[in-house]
Amino acid sequence: MFDQIAERYDLLNDVLSLGQDRWWRRVVAHTVAARPGERVLDLAAGTGTSSATFTTAGAYCVACDFSLGMLQVGARRAASRRGPDGPAPGPVRFTAGDALALPFRDRAFDAVTISFGLRNVADPDAAMAEMLRVTRPGGRLVVCEFGHLPSARLDGWYGRYLGAALPAVARRLSPSGDAYEYLAESIREWPRQAELARRMGAAGWSAIRWRDLTLGVVTVHAALRPE
């Protein structure tokens, strides 16, 4: 499904979020707070749009995704942005991988982040435990995912928008717009913010906190791997 929407994925994100996705990415990058020389793993990275934000301070980022189509589009775009002397410092490396069995050694990364992807994993709890495995002691986890609005009435209105307007707009911009019916369903079924925090703790993460963005449409959870 994600292979089919890869070419227009970033455009659809921009349109469907009314441009808010750019702000969400900046908040995630600020929360990750990647430093020079650090290793960052960006899971469910898609075309790598978010991955590039972690390298501006000199960090090294691995953009990992289950969808080869997404990675191919991202790698092609990254290559087209390179200058005559090659890539800029702090490059992004595109790697195929399954969040339930990451192809990396234990404690390999200083920070792990996943944006709008944990919801798509067959077993989110096992994925969070796997993220813990590849993060060094004291390292960070940042999860950006769709949330729920605090008011039941607003959340109900938002659910109707997801079920009707979102797929309709997507069909006008993408030949695979029907895939966004799945998106709407998965958002409605995703746990609330406090429940996700509890499950992060059960997977072994500590110092868990979260911040709602855009009235709770999106939530950024942050945690640490215990020393």
Image (cartoon, grey):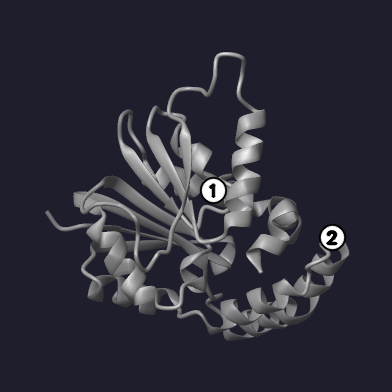
For the residue marked with disc 1, what is the amino acid? Arg
Distance Cα–Cα, label 1 vs label 2:
22 Å
Residue 198 spot, x, y in % from top left: 30, 76
Q: Nearer the viewer, mark 1 or mark 2?
A: 2
Is 69 situated above or below 164? above
* Residue count near mark 2 (Cα–Cα under 10 Å), binned few <14, some 14–19, many ≥20: some
Secondary structure of the residue carrying numbered label 1 = helix
In this rendering, is residue 220 above or below 195? above
In this view, the residue in front, 71 or 148, is 71
Identify the amino acid type marked 2.
Leu
In the rendered image, the quadrant that contains the N terminus is: bottom right
Residue 119 visible (yes or no): yes
What residue does disc 1 label?
25
Please name the residue shown 27% across and 68% down the image: 129
Between residues 54 and 157, which one lies in front from this camera angle?
A: 54
Are there few (<14), some (14-19), or many (20+) residues within 10 Å of tag 1? some
> Does 84 appear above or below 30?
above
Residue placed at 58% from the left, 76% from the top? 187
Q: Position of residue 89 (x, y in %)?
A: 45, 23
In this rendering, would 147 be left or right of 11? left
The numbered disc on residue 173 is 2
Q: Is residue 17 visible?
A: no
